[in-house]
Structure formats: C-alpha cells, structure tokens
Amino acid sequence: MVTRAPYRSPRGLAAVAALLALTAVGCSEASEVVDDAKDGAKKAARQRSVFSLDVGDCYNPNGKAEGEAYLVEVVPCDEAHQGEVVGEFSMESVPEYPGDGKVEIADERCAAEAQRYAPDTWALPAGVGLSHYTPTRESWATGDHAVSCTYTVEKGTFKGSLNTAKSFEPDQLTFLKGSNSVYETLWAHQPVTDDVEAALKDYRAQAEAVAAALGTHVEGLGGIDGTEVGKLRATLTQAAGQWEKAANAPDADAFYLAYDQAFTLIDPGKTVAARKELGLATTVPAEDAEVWAS
C-alpha cells in the first residue's frame, strides 16, 4: 500500500490574515479587501499534496511546473486550470529508488495511461503536453512508489475535462490505438545522435520497431470499413515495407534511401481523410506539422 504524505490545510491561517487585513483599512476599501481575502481563503482551502492527487483531478501548480513540488491547487475542471491527472501507476515492482531512471519509466507508462484517458491526441487543447509527478528519494523511503501522469500546459490554461475515452466507437478506438502506437514508437526509439552512419545500429532498431507498429496498425485497419481508411491502409502497408528496408539496410546510404520514403509515408497529414471519415479530429497538431514540413 502506498503511503501518502499527510497535509495540513492552511485555511485557518488564511482567515486570520484576512481579519488582520480588515483592521488595517478604511471602510471604503473594506469590500475589496474582503473579496481578496475570500479569494485567498478559497485558494488555500483547495491546496492538496501532490501525493494525494487522483485520476480526474484538475489543478494549478504552485510555482513552476518543473522541479520538486509538494502542493497544488485542485479546482473544478470547468474552471480554468493548467493540469489534469490522466492516469497513475505504482513502481512497487522496482526494487530500489530508480533515480533518473524514473523518468524513462514514467514516460513509457504515462503515454499508455494518457491514451486510455484521452485517446485522440489531436483533440487536445493547444499547448497541452504529457508530464508526471514522481516520488522523491525521501518519499520513496516512506513507501511512496506512485506516479501521477498529467496533461499540462506551460502557458495559459484550458477548461473542461480531457477524459473522452467513453465517447469513442470501437472503430475509432482501434484506429487511434494503432495510430498512436506508430508515432509513440517512432519517437521512443529515436537515436540520440543525428549521425546515422555512427549510430546505424540504433537507427535500424528504430526502423524495425516502427515497421512492427505499422504492421499491427495495418492489421487493425483491415477490420474497419471505409474508402479513405482503405486508402490509408494501402499507404501504411507501403510505409511498413520501407521501414523494413531501412531496418535491413546494409549501410547508411541504403538506410537513407528507404528512410526518406518511409518517413514521408507516415506524414500525419496523410491520415486526415481517414480521420474525417471516422469522425475524429482532423487538425494536425502544430508540433507534428512542423516536423514533417521540415
């Protein structure tokens, strides 16, 4: 059982501060001070430990989104907020504090959790990205092995819950699961260097993984009716073949020839017509559009 860090609400302190503030102003300013005090007390009452966040909670970080955090302001999802908890899991199977390795574990698991919570990443508000809260070394020692997966924005806010999993039909979910897997696999296996010749083994491994993800996606598309879906299936079948060629390329030159075609064939823009046919979001996320445009 995960031990959560206790949290003591500062509600009482906020009320005392409001009372002291009222005694220091004239009557003409009292109303404004009362409103400010109420807002402060409301925010204080909403403070929660990050160790007690639950899936579905919408919140505002206290301070910067990066670095260590212990408290957040939990708010109703219909109010403007900067983050939402979209999944959680425990690292109880990890024998000791994973240190920097916890980031890799969280990245992989949180992507899967987020997909179950909000399957269509194209429908997310602009600027929303996947993040997470992981245990500190100190909280790990007390038995806290929980990771909270979140969607957050670095700038601005968004309104409404991102929990859309129950709004999709089976064919839509099949498409999204396969499509998400292809792009997650692509970036999860992206080599750290741009020097293909020096890291040819790593690039081949990436190509092999993407080819496998495409094979699964193509198989799933075979069970979905639709003219545009059929066209996309043919395109992705061709793409899988090029990724396989890249995976088996004997040298960097051969890899480049196959990779250029393979990468072009999985341009997200090529999925728009099929998405429209299936009733899914059709605006390519700005980050993806920029990558394939370059």
Image: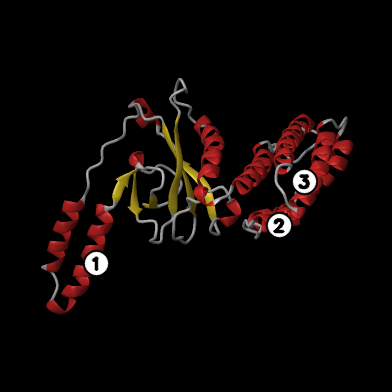
Percent x, y for residue 54? 37, 42
- Residue 101 drawn above or below residue 132: above
Along the line of sight, the residue nearer the viewer: 281 or 225 = 225
Q: For the residues carrying marks 3 and 1, which lies nearer the camera in this image? A: 3
Percent x, y for residue 209? 72, 33
Q: Earlier in the sequence, mark 3 or mark 2?
A: 3
Label 1: element kind: helix
Q: Quadrant of the N terminus?
A: top left
Q: What residue is rendered at 21% in x and 50% in y?
A: 10
User: What residue did someone put label 2 on?
Assistant: 272
Along the line of sight, the residue nearer the viewer: 224 or 77 = 224
- Residue 284 drawn above or below residue 141: below
User: What residue did someone put label 3 on?
Assistant: 233
Percent x, y for residue 150? 47, 46
Kind of residue sitting beneath label 3: Arg
- Residue contact at pointers 2 and 1, CB within 8 angstroms: no
Q: Earlier in the sequence, mark 3 or mark 1?
A: 1
